[in-house]
Amino acid sequence: MTKEEKKVFVSGLMASVTVSIFDKIDSGDIPEEWDGIELRWYLAEKLGQQTVSPTNFYTKGRKRDYDNAVLVSGVL
């Protein structure tokens, strides 16, 4: 993927999750008393639902390589 393709992918994924969460807020499914803490947890869960399972045979090696790259680069 080029840098631009990566940006488009991330933007589209985030927009999809954002719309989904906004719909839940508008419909009243998200409790009124939730603030930034609960919303961060919810956002993390929603984004987690968008991932590919690392137990999938195809992704096992890629996940290991990803974990190593994150550790070495300090990107997080």
Image (cartoon, rainbow, N blue to C red):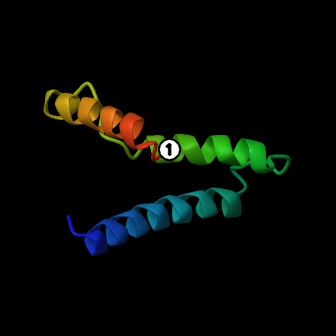
Relative to 63, 40 lies left or right: right
**Farthest residue in the bottom direction?**
4
- For residue 47, above or below residue 58: below
What's the residue at 27%, 33% (across, down)? 63
Tell me the crowding category of disc 1: few under 14, some 14 to 19, or many 20 or more residues within 10 angstroms, Cα based: few
Q: Secondary structure at mark 1?
A: loop
Residue that lies at the very extreme toward the left in this rendered image:
58
Residue at the spot of label 1? 76
Q: Is residue 59 left or right of residue 31?
A: left
**Quarter placement of the N terminus:** bottom left
Percent of width and height locating residue 67: 34, 33
Residue 3 occupies which quadrant of the picture?
bottom left
Amino acid under disc 1:
Leu
Q: Eyeballing the image, is 14 above or below 61?
A: below
* 12 in relation to 45, above or below: below
Residue 40 image point, x, y percent? 67, 46
Q: How many marks?
A: 1
Nearer to me, 6 or 31: 6
Q: Position of residue 53 (x, y in %)?
A: 30, 33
Residue occupying the point 21% across, 36% down? 62
Q: Is residue 71 left or right of residue 56?
A: right
- Picture coordinates of residue 28, whole percent (x, y): 73, 55
* Residue 64, quarter of picture: top left
Residue at left offset 81%, top offset 49%: 35
Q: Residue at x 53, y 65 (%)?
A: 19
Most extreme residue toward the right, as rendered? Answer: 33
Q: Of 47 and 3, which appears nearest the observer?
A: 3
